[in-house]
Amino acid sequence: AGFSKQNNPVFYYIARRFKVNEMNCDLLIYHVLLTLKPFQAKPFELVVDFTHTCTDNRFKTDYLSKWFICMPDCFYYNLQACYIYNCNSWVREYTKYHDRILSTIKGSRKLIFLDHISRLNDFIEFDQQKLPGHTLSLEEDLKVFNNALKLSHKDTKVAIKVGPQAIQVTSSEKTKVLGQSVLLNDVYYASEIEEVCLVDDNQFTLTIANETGPLSFIHND
């Protein structure tokens, strides 16, 4: 869908659209192979949108291995760049758990993590970008609280972005994902937020559906 500044065709993978309990992964692999077949001898680029990706969107271990087995070497050779947007805490834990399977791409220069959607403009002209509107709308009408802390066994510096559709919690310090330093961005849709509790003027907790416990934050704004 569209072309990069290098005039390569660009493909998109929207991770949240794959439902592990509803879709056949063999059919997905087959679909990807068919889609890429005309381009197997040509350079191409890939955009991976990890916005709000969670365990429902995972590849089971055997299928994750299958991707690496089924994809011809020419696809890896001709893949010029893979742009990764909205990497989150769940993706980090998933990649750590499957470190052995993912070792072949760990530290690859072809992996480019985007800290902000505007960075995609460096590689793909705006009118050629095909990210879903739902992903793009998360950056609209935001009130941002910088210098916040997410409280846990290890407090984490974060920025809290509050918008009409969601609350986003973006790490202020980079962490390692696939051998690269990355800012994580966790998205919580308004429909998932069961309770907001103000502890005092500077501290509040969020109770999120399917989270093991409430999330606690302190901010100074």
Image (cartoon, rainbow, N blue to C red):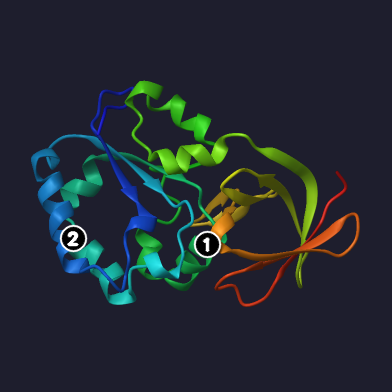
Residue occupying the point 8% across, 40% down: 38
Q: Is residue 115 above or below residue 23?
A: above
Looking at the image, residue 184 lies above or below residue 44: below
Q: Position of residue 24 (x, y in %)?
A: 20, 69
The residue located at (45%, 31%) in the rendering is 120
- Residue picked out by circle 2: 29
**Position of residue 192 in the picture relative to residue 199 (left or right):** left
Can residue 112 be seen from the camera position used here?
no
Between 177 and 73, which is closer to the camera in this rendering?
A: 177
Mark 2: amino acid: Ile
Marks 2 and 1 sit apart, C-alpha to C-alpha, by 23 Å
Give the labeled residue for mark 1.
Answer: 92
Q: In which quarter of the image is the C terminus?
A: top right
Residue at the image point whose x is 40% and y is 71% from the top: 100
Q: Which of 38 and 165 is in front in this view?
A: 165
Q: Where is residue 99 in the image (x, y as percent from the top left)?
A: 44, 68
Looking at the rendered structure, the kind of residue marked 1 is Arg
Answer with mark 2 or mark 1, whichever residue precedes in sequence: 2
Q: How crowded is mark 2: few (under 14 residues within 10 Å), some or many (20 or more)?
A: some
Query: Residues at badges 2 and 1 in contact (C-beta under 8 Å)?
Result: no
Vertical side of 132 occupied by 31: above or below: below
Which type of secondary structure does the marked residue at label 1 adopt?
helix
| Label 1 Cα crowd, 10 Å radius (few <14 / some 14-19 / many 20+) | some
Q: Where is residue 22 in the image (x, y as percent from the top left)?
A: 27, 70
Residue 9's disc number: none
Along the line of sight, which residue is nearer the eye, 207 or 118? 207
| Quadrant position of residue 133 | top left
SS of the residue at dot 2?
helix
